[in-house]
Amino acid sequence: MTILSLQGVSKSFGALKVTDDVSLDLAAGEALGIIGPNGAGKSTLFNLITGNLRPDQGRVLLDGRDVTGESPMQRCVSGVGRSFQIPQPFGHLTVYENLLVAARFGARLPAAEAPGFCMDILQRTGLAAVADRKAGGLPLLSRKRLELARAMATRPRVILLDEIAGGLTDAECVDLVATIRAIHAGGTAIIWIEHVLHALNAVVERLMVLNFGKMLMIGAPDAVMAAPAVREIYLGIEA
């Protein structure tokens, strides 16, 4: 069953075409990785999926329903969650309060149900011990975990992860990957942009390569990384 579909999506800023006729089907519960050099259009693609940008051409479908004209909030309520490359919590709120906002407004949970729901997510993401700490004072790994937890608190069917492993130590990356794998095992579909390839390949079933806004190829991670065009364009290795 296809949960998310992009059909011929294109986006330009002036003369610069940053997304060029991208089509993609994401199955329910699937984990898809996206790689590509800086400026390839990866974050723009996320913004088109979440509704922060609208395509010049093409459509975005969620569960077969055209959501191209819907706002980011409408898409969030419909089941699209997102973490950002640079964590953006409400710094003056506690970790728990950040999740509560997401649960009440993103998942539209009733006031009586939201607290227990949020505490469960705090346990699953390793944040229960810092639930009462102000989000603005957290170290990097905890801020990354909070980005993931806030996305989960919107009760998404698809989570978009934007370089969530960036800046972490190897040990921190291993811990975070274990959390992401557990979330994926629970049935949540994931699209993950990442430069830390060993983290990405530990989770995803398919890998897509973007280059200058175009989809270069998509397939099994090992096959994609072995392709001469990918090695030359992405890794800088002459084919």
Image (cartoon, rainbow, N blue to C red):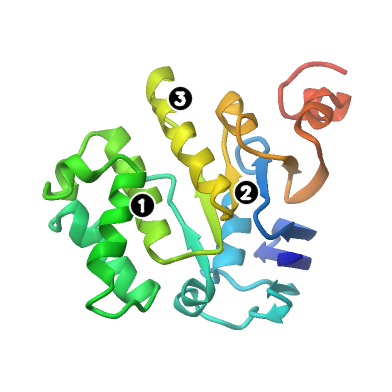
Q: Earlier in the sequence, mark 2 or mark 3?
A: 2
Depth check, mark 2 against mark 3: the one in front is 3
From the viewer's perspective, is 91 left or right of 181? left
Q: Earlier in the sequence, mark 1 or mark 3?
A: 1
Q: Which residue is mark 3?
A: 174
User: Label 3 sits on what residue type?
Assistant: Val
From the viewer's perspective, is 120 left or right of 85? left
Are circles 2 and 3 on residues that touch, CB within 8 Å? no
Identify the residue at image location x=41%, y=58%: 151
Identify the residue at image location x=36%, y=45%: 124
User: Label 2 sits on what residue type?
Assistant: Lys
Q: Which residue is mark 1?
A: 149
Q: Earlier in the sequence, mark 1 or mark 2?
A: 2
Q: Where is residue 166? Give x, y as percent.
A: 45, 32
Q: Where is residue 33? Give x, y as percent.
A: 66, 42
Q: Residue 48, located in which quarter of the rendered image? A: bottom right
